Amino acid sequence: MSFFDHLVLGFSTAVSPENLAYCFAGCALGTVIGVLPGIGPLATISVLLPFTFGLEPTTALIMLAGIYYGAAYGGSTTAILVKLPGETSSVVTVLDGHEMARQGRAGVAIAAAAIGSFVAGCVGTLALAAFAAPLAAVAFRFGPAEYSSLMFVGLLGAVSLSSGSIARALGMVLIGLILGTAGTDLDSGVQRFTFGQPLLWEGINFVIVAVGLFAFGEVVSGLDEGERGEGVSAPMGSLMPTREDVRRMTPSILRGTAVGSVLGVLPGAGLSVSSLFSYTLEKRVSRFRHLIGKGAIEGVAGPEAANNAAAQTAFIPSLTLGVPGSPTMALMLGAMVMHNIQPGPQVMTRNPDVFWGLVASMWIGNAILIVLNLPLVGLWVRLLRIPFRALYPAILLFCCLGVYSLRFSTFDVFLAAGFGLAGYVFRRLECEPTPLVIGFVLGPLLEENFRRALIFAEGDYTVFVREPVSLGLLLLGALVAAGAGAARSKTGLAAAPG
Amino acid sequence: MKTFVRALLVAAATIAPLFANTAQNQPIVLVIPFSAGGSNDSIGRYLADRLSRLWHQTVVVENRPGAGSAIGAAHVARSAPDGHTLLFVSSSLTTMAATVTNLPFDPMKDLQTVGLAAVGQSVIVTGSRIRMPTLASLIEQSRERTIFYGTAGVGTTSHLAAELLNDAAGIKMTTVHYRGASNAMIDMAGGRLDVYVGAVASLMSSIASGTATPVAVAGRMRDPAIPDVPTAAEAGFPGMEADVWWGVFAPAGTPAAEVSRINAGINAVMETPESRALLAKNGAVPRQLSVEAFELLVAADLQKWSRLAKARGISTN
């Protein structure tokens, strides 16, 4: 059966009225939970899983997959509008996305994110369809040494991508690293920074840090700055991107898609770093790189494309090798097993209608999401016009509910409030919270993989430079750091009085 | 202002139905100390659903993940012992009790065993670097070079079971900890990890795709999902058993009549063709035990793991 025949089979399966309806329902539901802080695709999928038992396997998987990337779309909407990253992949979208919202270009930002995600989704789906098996084989050559070098480059990127002072960014990354160590150490079982509180044994949840630093911190400093009772100060511009905007977005989207498609295949860590790498790349390579950080459309379109491409290609190791790259993927695999589909290389031959139906529905899901989200942009943007005295309490309420829903614990809510206070203090000290969050997410991954690489290498530190991919990544990191240093000295010279 | 106060009073009055909770229609809360998703959660939710149908009473699932299963278990241990709050947990409760030194509750004293829902077997799997898929070959290779075994975390069943293998075979495999079985399988697929001892349920997809090769079942009988794989006893290592189970507990002090009633309910709903089918998908089978028999099982497990943990120095502080 040729590739074209496969696609035809897939689309004929996916375009049935029932499958389309469930795809739409999944995407809509996914968007809603992506927007709401706290409850995420993982919890939603697991709660809905039993209800899908009565459905056809393909239909069930289509709906669950729709929830999965619908949530990614929703997460970027809140990142842009209210500076609250819905998940790790939207952290970077906050930077330029919210700046654009402040400048009255929220609609354009959301549209850019949606368009970027759609294009990337199409390409990612194609990559999944055409290159699933060979890509998967490559992915597993990526061992702990390579992962730790990748994380290291990510951390260097986090420092270099901030627009403020390097010292402050470095400090924030270090604080993020320290916060990331809280919890029970993986290798020794020693409890670090738990202060005898069992609720901290598994570390601090990302949602708590994100909600606290971004949402609560933003609300408090907004009150402090004494914003006028109105909404966003700048006049609301057009909701749709102009031709100029589209011209600027296109190279970023293409670059982001490439970065995301490659990184997404790496099980586990790829998803978290894809948007970060795209942002760093844009900062180095884009023609408008001097504007990135101040509301450049490249800073939104690129990372969003990267993270959606990664979300699609993340299915590759799961479907072809039965090895999930993330908890959500593990759940999807569990769903497949529940419906008597064994994931693995044979899934393409034994259940072609399921595999290709799923692939086709991914493309349809992306199409549905863009159809859903673009018209909704006007609605989302109108939210910004709500006077702060009504908007802030609503944000606080939803965030508290979201944090509480994680584990029915008020401790979590108070912890988030504590981070809110910290977020306010950081703002007053002109320290951006983004490098902290990136350090918080990547730090534990770096530590875990670094130590594991050393265990496998039996204590030989040269493993990080012996392995070609690892060495290549470290050299890339050196380039990133050098580039950041050069850029800064250039602007320093320009800014210094003549 | 007056309108506001009036509105507030009306709103306050709407909570009146809350006080209508009499003992009969008060819901039973089944606390699952794991996050939503995964075999623990799906089996627990299934049980809750079936019990509520049997008793015509609402049985609500509350996920309270955290600290392994300690948060949820501690919550139940502190709850009122009236049979309305129950804990659904896996055998990780005993491995946790054996290795965690500062638990916020005492699993033996603060919890009362109620009933067993299902049991599953563990299987020893090997990666591509092990020459032949037999236990003997694995042991022979372990004497030639460093063999790495993966775990789902310090003090988990996979960790303790592998240490049991070290003990039984007199070998010294090197520990590599992961956050969960799936992450361990990633390294096994990459040819870096050699051994993993885990529940058949969590390893089925890796076995099916050829990533992991089953070598021996760490249990009393061969597993129907992998009928060609011998037990560890057949391969020459009796005592290498690491069954996982899922059971229900109640706070200590719950009246014996309540406990028996719930035990009967669990035994009734789990021994049906439908339950068997669902459990089979999770690599488990139902088993009916009386309250006392379950208590003995839990105590035996705890003793086995505590002894091993102490001998091998495995603990988290």
Image (cartoon, rainbow, N blue to C red):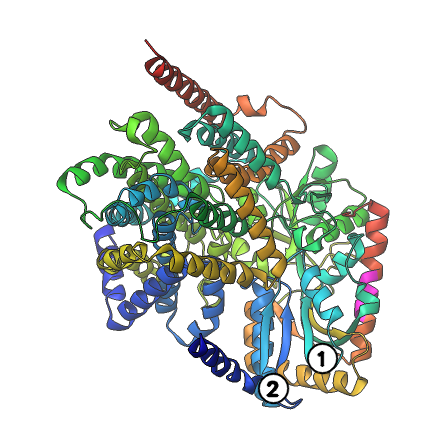
The residue tagged 1 is: B288
Q: Position of residue A150 (x, y in %)?
A: 48, 32
Q: Position of residue B271 (x, y in %)?
A: 63, 82
The residue positioned 39% from the left and 19% from the top of the image is A488
Q: Is residue A64 left or right of residue B28?
A: left
Q: Earlier in the sequence, mark 2 or mark 1?
A: 2
Dominant secondary structure of the residues highlighted in magenta in the image:
helix
Quarter location, residue A71: bottom left
Q: Is residue B259 left or right of residue A333?
A: right
| Residue A248 falls within the magenta-colored stretch | no
Looking at the rendered structure, which numbered label has been put on residue A183?
Answer: none
Q: Position of residue B227 (x, y in %)?
A: 61, 64
For residue A398, say whether it is visible.
yes
Q: Amino acid at mark 2?
A: Phe
Describe the element under mark 2 as helix, strand or loop: helix
The residue positioned 15% from the left and 37% from the top of the image is A244
Local crowd size for mark 2, using a 10 Å CA cut-off: few (<14), some (14–19), many (≥20): few
Nearer to the camera, B177 or B168: B177
| Residue B299 falls within the magenta-colored stretch | yes
The residue tagged 2 is: B19
Range of magenta residues: B297-302
The residue positioned 62% from the left and 87% from the top of the image is B21
Task: Tell me whether the residue at label 2 lies in contact with that at label 1, contact meaning CB atoms closer than 8 angstroms.
Answer: no
